[in-house]
Image (cartoon, coloured by chain):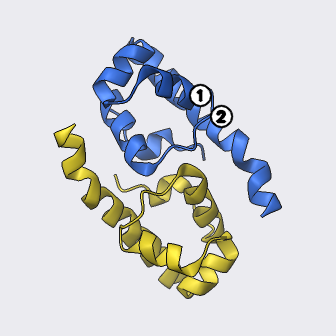
Chain colours: A blue, B yellow
Amino acid sequence: MPDNRRTKPALLAEFGRRVRAKREAAGFSQEELGARAGLHRTYIGGVERGERNISLLAVEQIARALRCSMSNLMPD
Amino acid sequence: MPDNRRTKPALLAEFGRRVRAKREAAGFSQEELGARAGLHRTYIGGVERGERNISLLAVEQIARALRCSMSNLMPD
């Protein structure tokens, strides 16, 4: 799947940018978002840097903590 | 995280229903969608039944194969 593989980093990086933008708009630190989402702050950091191929359930935890929809975080 | 945990199955089941509806609307078998997405048909079956906590990259592969947006598949 060379085509899919090529687009992966950009997709995760864009998702991470969206999480970071929403988090900063909400005035949360990574630690605070992590606490609200039930995820570790280092995991949040990895997500925001596009280093994590995050699962749908973790996306939901973050979306809920940010009080936004999951679709709103999608990079497309 | 009892609250998050309680909602998990419903979230994945709703995602799976959306994938199945789009796949059937496109006239694809699970096998055909799997081939187009670069995923095994048994994995597609598990996703449609809400048994898989699918990653963002796999969501993208399925969305691309279904020619729809990722946000269109989100269960919220």
Find residue A8 and report its horizontal and vertical position in percent: 70, 47
Image point 48% across, 28% down: which residue? A43
Amino acid type at image mark 1: Arg
Res B46 quadrant in image: bottom left
Q: Which dot marks residue B24?
A: none
Find residue A67 and report its horizontal and vertical position in percent: 31, 31
In the shown orientation, is residue B30 left or right of residue B75? Answer: right
Image point 37% across, 67% down: which residue? B51
Q: Is residue B63 above or below residue A64?
A: below
Residue sitting nearer the eye, A3 or A38? A38
Q: Which dot marks residue A17?
A: 1
The answer to whether one can see residue B69 in this image is no
Label 1 resides on the chain identified as A
Q: Which dot marks residue A13?
A: 2
Res A13 quadrant in image: top right
Amino acid type at image mark 2: Ala
Tell me the element at label 2. Answer: helix
Image point 37% across, 21% down: which residue? A33
The answer to whether one can see residue B60 in this image is yes
Q: Is residue B8 above or below residue B42?
A: above
Q: Which quarter of the rendering shows the N terminus of chain B?
A: top left
Find residue B76 and report its horizontal and vertical position in percent: 34, 52
In the shown orientation, is residue B52 left or right of residue B56? Answer: left
Label 2 with label 1: CB-CB less than 8 Å: yes
Label 2 resides on the chain identified as A
Q: Is residue B37 above or below residue B55?
A: below
Label 2 vs label 1: CA separation?
A: 6 Å
Q: Residues within 10 Å of mark 1 (few under 14, many from 20)?
A: some
Q: Residues within 10 Å of mark 2 (few under 14, many from 20)?
A: many
Find residue A24 and report its horizontal and vertical position in percent: 46, 15
